[in-house]
Image: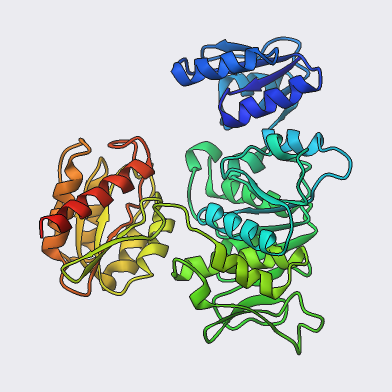
Amino acid sequence: MICVLGAGVSGAAAARLLAARGERVVVLEGRDGERQRAAAAELATAGVEVRFGEPEAVPEGASLIVATGWPPHHPALVAAAEAGAEVIGEVELAWRLRPEGAAPWLALTGTNGKTTAVRMLTSMLTAAGHRALAVGNVGVPVAEAVAGPYDVLAVELSSFQLHRAPSVAPLAAAVLNVAPDHLDWHGSMEEYARAKGEIFARAGTVVHNADDEWSARLAAPYPGAVGFTLQVPRPGQLGVVEDLLVDRAFTADPVREAAELASLEDVRPFAPHNVANALAAAALARAYGVPPEAVRQGLRDFVPDPHRIAHVARVGGVDYVDDSKATNPHAAAASLAAYPSIVWVAGGQLKGADVDDLVRQAAPRLRGAVLLGADRGLIRRALARHAENVPVVEVAGQDTGVMDRVVAEAARLASPGDTVLLAPAAASLDMFTGYPARGEAFARAVQRLGAAG
């Protein structure tokens, strides 16, 4: 019997894959709601048993445990470890059960930018004529696609997934960046970074961000690692020369030869961190043999996901930008660096994250700040310490209707030429069902502001 922890998207995919191979599968699900019950009913048709309730231990006799997102300190996993049971994740399961001749993996991870980069990569691969699919943390479980009719898989991996993927060996792997996040799950920054670095352990080609301290540190033990940088690239790197993205790693003679991949205009939406995402994706595509013209076409064909530095409207000469996906300080810092004069909309659940460095770096760009959400006071105090001349407005209340007041206050602080930027640096669940709902509320409020003249 094999035990799967969690009946969510990844857990259900793992359970179906195992059941299709004739295994007896028991799924443990801690939450008991309408969505979980619907998943259980679907799994029952495949012969999978789902047990509800927060478990203290896994069932006796389980030969393997597949954990999807459950933290290592969960009592059931602690008990399993003490009993000597093997615990893996859905990604590791998919890797072990690949059929002969299965598609190679191009994998990437990072604190921020993963989904954008993996979708850029998929677009480049498709432009080169390959049957490619974005899978993993992007929303499509690897277990669903591992036996599919694909030439190559673009695999987005979270630190949770990498924590339990001891044998995954991608053709090429990239770490975009590493900044404090999910420390409550991993226990420390060092352990979080170590989990990210697991993506390199068995990779054919190692790709790192030469501008990011942790990414470069994780790649240091691997001779021949390929770097990407927003600066002029050295041999063995991809980078930027004037307004061009160029490759000095995957050419016949990287010392004397560079390949033009694209222009900065091909990167949409344009922002420095998005250029870095494009370079990382290009490095992985080039490692697979994608020609330069397909890299350019892939960037041109790429359609950004919503709520990622998305321009909402221009009202009264002020641009309003939705980057609700900036749910931690590192992501918000990248967003704030993209605009010269900003009225910042921030706040939510900081999850213990420190915002002092973020505020200190952004202070010269700030013309005002409007704060909302549970931890807005922490951001206000950081602004008082590091940006004392920046006017700050706090909008109290936990109801979603406060966004109209937030946008109205931001409009009052902004002048023509400014950007009102929703880059919260925090999670959204104190007020919204998720960051998409927060971004949509912001966009609707801006549209009402414009309609009101």
Nearest the eye: 356 or 147 = 147
Does the image show residue 154? no
Left or right of residue 441, residue 253 in this image: right
Residue at 38% of width from left, 70% of height from top? 338
Residue 445 image point, x, y percent: 20, 50
Residue lying at the far bottom of the rendered structure = 256
Measured as percent of width and height from the top left, residue 199 is found at 69, 51
| 183 relative position to 407: left or right | right
Asked where in the image residue 259 lies, by quadrant, the reply is bottom right
Q: Nearer the viewer, residue 192 or 160?
A: 160
Residue 149 occupies which quadrant of the picture? top right
- Viewer-nearest residue: 264 or 202: 264
Residue 277, picture quadrant: bottom right
Left or right, 297 with reference to 20: left
Q: Position of residue 81 (x, y in %)?
A: 69, 24
- Observer able to see residue 88: yes
Q: Is residue 452 above or below residue 334?
A: above
Q: Residue at x 74, y 87 (%)?
A: 257
Q: Residue at x 31, y 46 (%)?
A: 440
Image quadrant holding the N terminus, namely: top right
Image: 8 above or below 83: below
Residue 408: % across, % down: 13, 54
